[in-house]
Image (cartoon, grey):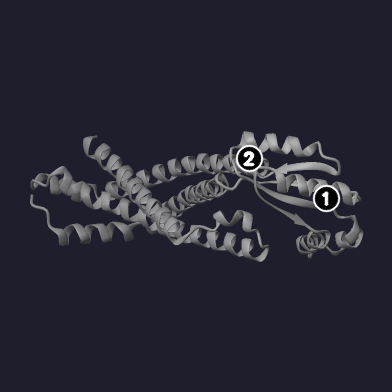
C-alpha cells in the first residue's frame, strides 16, 4: 500500500487527541526529564567557561594583617614589584575592602554594625606571568613567609571547590534525568500500546487489505515523536527561564567571577537544539518499540 501524506497526517492528529490524559502525562514527564538534562548542561557549560576564563589568568591574593607595620607593607609591595615572576599586582586599600564588605553585606545591617573600617584586612591582587598552578602555589608559599602576611589565597582553590560542587550537582541532575527519561519512555510506550489496542479492529482490516507494517506504525511513531518534541519545547522554556534567573542574580549581586554561568545565545541555542532532538528521538524510538511489539505479537 502506497504512503499517503494526508492519511499519515490525519491519523497522527487523531492519535494525539484520542487519549488526552495519557498524552498530557507523557508530555509533562518528558518535559521534566529534559529540564533536568538541560539544567545539567547549563552547569557543565558554565563550569567549562569558568575554567577557560582562569586558565590564562590564574591569580592569588596576599592578605595582610590589619595592624601591619608600614615598613612590612612596603616590603611586600617592593618584593612584588621586583619579582620577575609577577606580571601585575595591585594593593587594595582598607577603604576599598570596607566598601566591598558593605556591598556584600548590604542586606544584613547587623553584620555591618559589628565591623569597623579599621578592622578589615587589606590585600594584594597578584597575577603571575606563568599561569601554571604549581608555579602559582610555589610563589604563594614564598610570599607567605614575608612579615605582615597572614594568608595567601589562590583563585585555583576557589575554582576547584566550585568545580567539585557543580560536578556533583551536574551528576545528580543527570542521574535524575536518566531515571525520569526512563519513566517517560515507559509512559509513552504504554500510551502507544493503549492507542493501538483501541484501534485493533481497524489495524486488522488494514492488514487484510495489504497495508505494510510501516504504513501502520508510522502514524503512531510520529505521534510519539511529536509528544516528545512538545515536552522538549516545555523543557527549553524552563531552561531559558532558569538561565534568565541566574543572569538576574549575577547582575544584582555583581558576581562577575561567575559570569560564565550567564550563557550566551549561541550556547542556549545549542542546548535547546539538543533538548528538542532528544525529546523527538525518545518519542520516536519508544513508540517504534511499542508498535513493533504489538504487530509482532
Q: Nearer the viewer, residue 2 or 62?
A: 62
The reply to whether residue 201 is visible in this rendering is no
Disc nearest the viewer among 2 and 1: 1
Of 7 and 102, nearer the camera is 102
Numbered-mark total = 2
Q: State the residue in front, 265 or 35.
A: 265
**Label 2, label 1: how many angstroms apart (C-alpha)?**
32 Å
Horizontal side of 235 relative to 193 (left or right) equals right
The image position of residue 285, as x and y in percent, is 31, 43
Residue at image location 21% in from the left, 47% down from the top:
217
Under tag 1, what secondary structure? helix
Q: Is residue 116 left or right of residue 130?
A: right
Q: Earlier in the sequence, mark 2 or mark 1?
A: 1
The residue that label 2 is drawn on is: 160
Residue named by callout 1: 74
Can residue 30 be seen?
A: yes
Do the residues bearing badges 2 and 1 touch, measured as CB atoms within 8 Å?
no
Secondary structure found at label 2: helix
Residue 72 rendering spot, x and y as whole percentages: 86, 46
- As drawn, the label of residue 140 is none
Residue 46 in percent (x, y) is at 53, 50
Residue 244: give x, y in percent of width and height: 54, 63
| Residue furthest to the front | 82
Q: Quadrant of residue 297?
A: top left
Label 2 crowd (10 A; few <14 / some 14-19 / many >=20): few
Q: Residues within 10 Å of mark 1 (few under 14, many from 20)?
A: few
Amino acid at each position: 500500500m502506497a504512503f499517503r501524506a494526508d492519511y499519515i497526517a490525519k491519523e497522527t492528529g487523531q492519535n494525539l487527541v484520542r487519549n488526552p490524559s495519557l498524552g498530557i502525562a507523557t508530555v509533562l514527564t518528558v518535559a521534566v526529564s529534559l529540564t533536568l538534562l538541560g539544567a545539567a548542561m547549563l552547569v557543565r557549560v558554565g563550569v567549562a567557561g569558568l575554567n577557560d576564563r582562569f586558565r590564562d589568568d590564574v591569580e592569588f591574593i596576599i592578605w595582610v594583617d590589619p595592624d601591619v607595620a608600614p615598613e612590612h607593607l612596603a616590603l611586600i609591595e617592593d618584593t612584588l614589584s621586583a619579582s620577575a615572576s609577577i606580571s601585575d599586582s595591585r594593593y587594595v586599600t582598607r577603604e576599598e575592602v570596607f566598601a566591598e564588605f558593605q556591598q556584600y553585606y548590604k542586606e544584613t545591617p547587623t553584620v555591618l554594625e559589628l565591623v569597623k573600617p579599621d578592622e578589615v584586612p587589606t590585600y594584594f591582587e597578584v597575577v603571575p606571568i606563568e599561569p601554571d598552578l604549581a608555579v602559582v602555589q610555589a610563589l604563594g608559599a614564598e610570599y607567605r613567609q614575608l612579615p605582615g602576611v597572614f594568608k595567601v589565597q589562590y583563585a585555583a582553590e576557589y575554582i576547584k571547590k566550585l568545580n567539585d560542587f557543580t560536578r556533583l550537582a551536574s551528576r545528580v541532575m543527570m542521574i535524575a534525568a536518566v531515571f525520569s527519561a526512563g519513566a517517560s519512555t515507559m509512559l509513552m510506550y504504554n500510551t502507544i500500546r493503549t492507542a493501538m489496542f483501541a484501534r485493533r479492529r481497524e489495524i486488522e482490516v488494514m492488514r487484510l487489505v495489504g497495508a505494510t507494517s510501516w504504513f501502520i506504525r508510522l502514524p503512531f511513531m510520529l505521534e510519539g515523536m511529536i509528544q516528545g518534541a512538545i515536552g522538549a519545547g516545555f523543557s527549553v522554556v524552563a531552561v531559558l527561564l532558569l538561565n534568565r534567573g541566574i543572569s538576574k542574580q549575577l547582575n544584582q549581586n555583581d558576581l562577575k567571577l561567575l559570569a560564565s554561568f550567564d550563557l550566551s545565545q549561541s550556547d542556549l541555542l545549542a542546548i535547546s537544539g539538543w533538548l528538542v532532538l532528544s525529546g523527538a528521538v525518545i518519542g520516536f524510538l519508544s513508540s517504534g518499540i511499542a508498535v513493533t511489539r504489538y504487530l509482532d505479537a
